[in-house]
Amino acid sequence: MFLILTDLLLHLFIRKTPDNNRYLNQYLLTPYHLPTKSTAAILESYNQNENRARLVYDEICGWRPAPNYSDTDSLDRYNHLGVRVSESDEKVYSPGRKQILLIGDSFVHGDEVAYADTWGAILQQNSESEIEIINLGVSGYGLDQAWLHLTTLLSEYHPDVIIMGIPLENMLRSVNILRPISSPASKIPYSKPRFFVRDDSLILLNQPCVPPPQVTEILLDPEKWSLWQYEFLYNENYRESLFDFSIYFSMANTISLYFKERERTFSEESEVRMINLKIIEGIQKTAETYGAITIFVEIPTRYDLWLSHLGQNQEQAAFLARIGKDIPVAKTTEAFLNSDLSIDDFFLKTHYSRAGNEILAMEIAKQLTILKKKNEEIQ
């Protein structure tokens, strides 16, 4: 009886969307439903406020920051290339200075904090004056988009180092095509490119990316879309059960499927793992054509840090070790856990606070120092 009563009580804390998706706090519970109505509403809002949208449609990457965007109510400001800058910064490239490009998702971009509190800006503040750090991070990106975004901007820059970073669990984005399926709550109503492997080579799909109005049409009848078979994230999370009325059951099922998803991400046979390793290899080769060094930075989420604290994050550690066979990796988890601060002190809502970004900047600076010494020894 107690379990029944508490289950009924939990229903009071459930938030439902127009598509009947259920959230407990910020967590989406199974079964998922295609966010057709929500996506249509977001698109309508975008159309009504087109000149004020921070992220705009891009046929190559799916979306990108709006050039020259600046909002007094927002922490974000972008130059004419759509690159995040400080209020006083409009530079594109300063000849004679070594240049470091940062690529990745919202943790690289620095969501939730002012530009000065991003790890890129902190790294700049603590670097020598002849080093220039450019933040090409974009909210919601997968590594595939980060790579494509990099290639569209390389004509504007001359990098000596390219640092890529993304929480490892977000590598699932590289096998996603419709962003509303990956993260309905992010309110990004666009599609994105998606690589798959054929004969050991990467093949690019959804290029150019379908325009926003078609995303809603696809969600209404996805089986008719020729690329639907490649939407990796339409999976058992959408399967309904006779017990879905129970919040306890949905919570348990959501947790169980989350760990299955982690296993699919990090297992050696995983398509997710294979594609992301290929993308990392592609980024490295792109960097080499410009004579640049590539570094991968570990970006642990709050949940990653708790798992590591409990000694339960071996899959990610093994994946990082695999990445480290090919390129230098700035590992950061140990620095977070050895700090006098609590794990929660490193985060705001979802992303890093300044304290969290300071840890990343510190560990990256150590990796850059190691590479500099190695280069001096070679010379």
Image: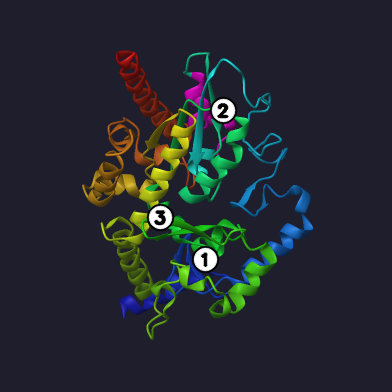
Tell which of 372 and 141 is nearer to you: 372
**Numbered label attached to residue 202:** none
Q: Which of marks 3 and 2 is nearer the N terminus?
A: 2
Give residue 138's position: percent from left, percent from top: 56, 44
Q: Earlier in the sequence, mark 1 or mark 3?
A: 1
Q: Please, is residue 334 above or below residue 59 in the view?
A: above
Real-space Cα separation, disc 1 to disc 2, in angstroms:
32 Å
Q: Mark 3 points at which residue?
A: 201
Q: Which amino acid does label 2 sit on?
A: Ala
Real-space Cα separation, disc 3 to disc 2, in angstroms:
40 Å
- Tell me the residue at 67%/63% (across/down): 212
Real-space Cα separation, disc 1 to disc 3, in angstroms:
26 Å
Tell which of 114 and 332 is nearer to you: 332
Residue 191 counted in the magenta span: no
Q: Please, is residue 107 above or below residue 159 in the view?
A: below
Quarter of the rendering containing residue 71:
top right
**Segment colored magenta:** 112-125
Tell which of 32 and 346 is nearer to you: 32
